[in-house]
Image: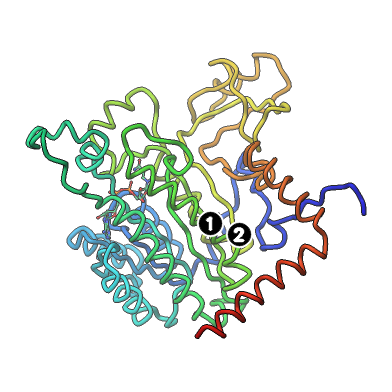
Amino acid sequence: MSDEIPSYPVGDLTGQSPPIDWSAPVKVDVSFVKGKTILVTGGASGIGAGFCKRWASYGANIIMGDISVAAGEDLIRGLRQSTGNPNHHFVEVDISNWESQVRFFQEAVRLSPTGAIDTVVANAGVNIQSEQKFFNDPATANYLDPASVPPPPQMRTLDVNLTGTLYTAHLALWFLSKNTGPNPPENTPRDRHLLLIGSVGSVYPLISQSFYTISKHAIMGLFRVLRMTSVAVHGIRVNMICPYFVDTSLLSSRAGFLLAGGGMGAVEDVVQAGSVFVSRPDIVGRAVFVGPRLATRVCQSENSVGDMPEIHSLSDIAIGPLDEGHAKALIQEGDDGVVQERAIWEIYSTDFQNVDVFTKRMVRLVNAYGAARGWSGYFMDMFTSVKKVMWGLIRR
Ligand SMILES: NC(=O)c1ccc[n+]([C@@H]2O[C@H](COP(=O)([O-])OP(=O)(O)OC[C@H]3O[C@@H](n4cnc5c(N)ncnc54)[C@H](O)[C@@H]3O)[C@@H](O)[C@H]2O)c1
């Protein structure tokens, strides 16, 4: 037996596409979006509204669900007027309620001119400060009797961001799989796509935002699980966007104060990332972070992670847009790095083996264990499983 520890190309086996080079503008195929039916949750304001407006302008049929009825109806009225397309619809939905989401998806199929859904965008989300404050520090609730125990915490943020998004994903897997006809307008094979909206909180702990961070970490977990199976099993591609702080109604004014000076992401850049994913059926299983637009000098070294530059000093970055002055200022620092302006960065560009040292070593360890056990280990495990099934049948 060879001493070499095998590595398994998980990405290749599960149909993921390679990392995207976001350092230059990435092509959006507008003609591919035309005629598609796109379902967006939480599209009445902020990032979701940005998605709806952009994709309606590309010729998609937008079916948008939101808990906020007046704002949702307003937006759809505006889209019908600006595009002349009567196939944009608003449906009231509370994503944390199963029956409500089922109705939303059923309505979407009924209203879609093709009778099917092509893309589902799980965008709706909340970040409720009061419940997180109480959870983090129950002693601050001064109405409590010090001798008693606190009541159970309110967890609406988890109900919406986690349970609600899981409902959306589950229904997407069901309804997208039913979309079997040819792809308008070119009769190419049908594209089925689920786009998850995470957050910087999917990869980074946001201090004091316990429920929000937990919910968005969970969505990253969901993404990482689904991208391993959903293309292979259901023919559904899954991608994810993790925006940095963006100035929408979700961001509290307190957060605005805390973040002052740090810069923000822009709805427009999040929408650009979403447009690349929605319009490019060749992109499968990718996650991006969308941050403030800035120009950097990229110096790859052995410590670089994916295409993320290492910043050594303030002279390595400039606040975008990248005009002549900024570019020159960076280049004149005198190294051979490349200057680029961007807001979108691939997150798991070199996974799975390289996500972090622990995963890498653990994967090697487990691979080595499997290889060392060889075929006899495989047959032993199979035998144990068959034995369990037999016992189950006998005991019935
Ligand atoms: N704004 C940011 O800084 C930021 C950063 C990272 C990620 N995000 C994520 O982007 C997504 C969109 O947020 P946004 O910034 O546009 O905020 P937003 O408040 O402008 O939009 C959220 C929308 O979701 C809707 N919604 C809330 N609860 C709902 C429910 N139970 N059912 C249906 N709709 C519901 C709201 O009515 C609203 O229209 C969220 O998932 C959010 O977590 C936002």
Left or right: where does residue 191 sit relative to residue 218? right
Q: Position of residue 74 (x, y in %)?
A: 22, 61
Task: Determine the image quadrant of residue 340.
Answer: top right
Q: Residue at x 71, y 67 (%)?
A: 381
Labelled disc at residue 284: 2
| Picture coordinates of residue 344, whole percent (x, y) | 53, 41
Question: What residue sits 27% from the left and 26% below the top?
Answer: 257
Disc 1 C-beta below 8 A from ligand 1? no
Which amino acid is tagged 1? Answer: Asn
Residue 38 spot, x, y in % from top left: 42, 68
Using the image as rendered, state which of residue 269 and residue 154 is in the foreground. Answer: 154
Answer few, some or many: residues within 10 Å of disc 1's Cα (few below 14, many 20 plus, some between 14 and 19): many
Judging depth in this view, the residue of 187 and 94 nearest the camera is 94
> Residue drawn 92% across and 51% down?
2
Question: Is there a contact, CB below 8 Å, between mark 2 and mark 1?
Answer: yes
Q: To which quarter of the image does residue 79 belong?
A: bottom left
Q: Residue furthest front?
A: 395
Specify the amino acid type for callout 2. Answer: Val
* Residue 112 in view (yes/no): yes
Which of the labelled discs sits on residue 311, or is there none?
none
Considering only vertical position in the picture, is 182 above or below 211?
below
Kindly identify which residue carries mark 1: 239
